[in-house]
Amino acid sequence: MNQRIVGYHQDEHDDWVADLACGHSQHVRHQPPFINRPWVVTSQGRSQHMGTLLNCKRCDDPLIIS
């Protein structure tokens, strides 16, 4: 289920995590060539992606414990 990004925080490894409108969170890493999200490494890029829709895997699968 698509959810909007409402904020960001960093995890214990300093990786960026998007806070989603549903209350769940999802890592938004930039690890080319597999994951290409160069916007996540700058505060301006993260700000520009506020409100962007991400597929929340926890909302899609009721068996995943939040």
Image (tube, rainbow, N blue to C red):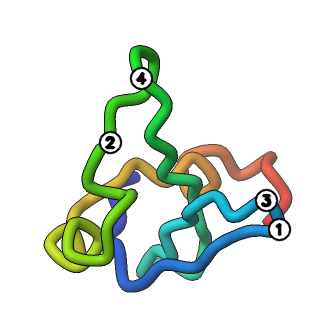
Q: Which residue is mark 1?
A: 12
Provide residue 56's location: percent of width, then percent of height: 49, 54
- Residue type at the position of mark 1: Glu
Disc 2 from disc 4: Cα separation: 8 Å
Q: Nearer the viewer, residue 22 or 16?
A: 16
Q: Is residue 42 left or right of residue 52?
A: right
Tag shown at residue 32: 4
Q: Are marks 1 and 3 in contact (CB under 8 Å)?
A: yes
Provide residue 32's location: percent of width, then percent of height: 42, 23
Q: Are marks 3 and 4 in contact (CB under 8 Å)?
A: no
Disc 2 from disc 1: Cα separation: 20 Å
Label whose residue precedes the other's in the sequence (2 or 4):
4
Q: Nearer the viewer, residue 7 or 23?
A: 7
Q: Secondary structure at mark 1?
A: loop
Label whose residue precedes the other's in the sequence (3 or 4):
3
- Residue type at the position of mark 2: Arg
Label whose residue precedes the other's in the sequence (1 or 4):
1
Disc 1 from disc 4: Cα separation: 21 Å
Provide residue 1's location: percent of width, then percent of height: 40, 52
